[in-house]
Amino acid sequence: MKKFLFLNAKYRVDRNTAFALALLPGIMLMVVQQIFLTTHVYEWYLPQLDIPMHIMGGASVAWAVWALMNYARSVKKLPKLPFWFSVFIAVGAAALVGVLWEHYEFLHDVYLHTDEQLAQFGTSDTMKDLADDLIGGFLLSVLVGRKMLKK
């Protein structure tokens, strides 16, 4: 398990494996999102499931950033950064991906004329979604980031 989490310095993974492990949680989350959309889980059963999905989305982006920073440090391509700066990078990446996702939802509605789950339910929904992305990125950074920097 420690090899997967990149927490132990004695394990060395090649570049392709590091990228695959960094992106795996996000890809799995996107597959689950597509399943939920096609089976109408959001609309018919659990509309509030949007909140944990955004939190997990922010966390998966932060995970990818931490894993890639850790890999870059292990191959001496990135110096050891202060913890607060690493958290800032990871949460910033989660915010950027969240903003891009909200634009995707908006464009999906405008150009495909959909009013499904991807529909924008107003500014307050968008702001809540972005806050959830930030919360997920921050929580993962605080919980996992310290362990990654200790090695």
Image (cartoon, rainbow, N blue to C red):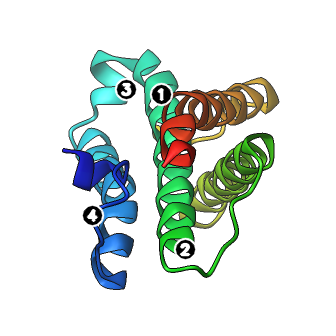
Cα distance in 3D space between marks 1 and 2: 33 Å
Numbered disc 3: secondary structure: helix
Q: Which residue is mark 4?
A: 11
Is disc 1 in contact with disc 2, using a CB cutoff of under 8 Å? no
Determine the CA span between mark 4 and mark 1. 36 Å
| Numbered disc 2: secondary structure | helix
For label 3, the residue is 43
Front label number (1 vs 2)? 2
Q: Foreground residue, 46 or 67?
A: 67
Mark 4 is surrounded, within 10 Å at the Cα level, by few (under 14), some (14 to 19) or many (20 or more) other residues, namely few
Q: Quadrant of residue 83?
A: top right
Q: Is 100 or 11 nearer to us in this picture?
A: 11
Q: Quadrant of the N terminus?
A: top left
**Residue at the (64%, 27%) spot, across then down:** 135
Residue position marked by numbered label 1 in the rendering: 50
Disc on the earlier residue, 1 or 2 = 1
> Marks 4/3: CA distance?
44 Å
50 above or below 88? above
Q: Nearer the viewer, mark 3 or mark 1?
A: 1
Question: Would residue 111 be visible to someone looking at this image?
Answer: yes
x%, y% of residue 132? Answer: 63, 28
Numbered mark located on residue 72 in the image: 2
Which element is circle 4 on? loop
**What's under tag 3, amino acid-wise?**
Glu
Marks 2 and 4 in Cβ contact (< 8 Å): no
- What amino acid is at disc 4? Tyr
Residue at image position (60%, 52%) is 105
Sequence-wise, the earlier of marks 4 and 3 is: 4
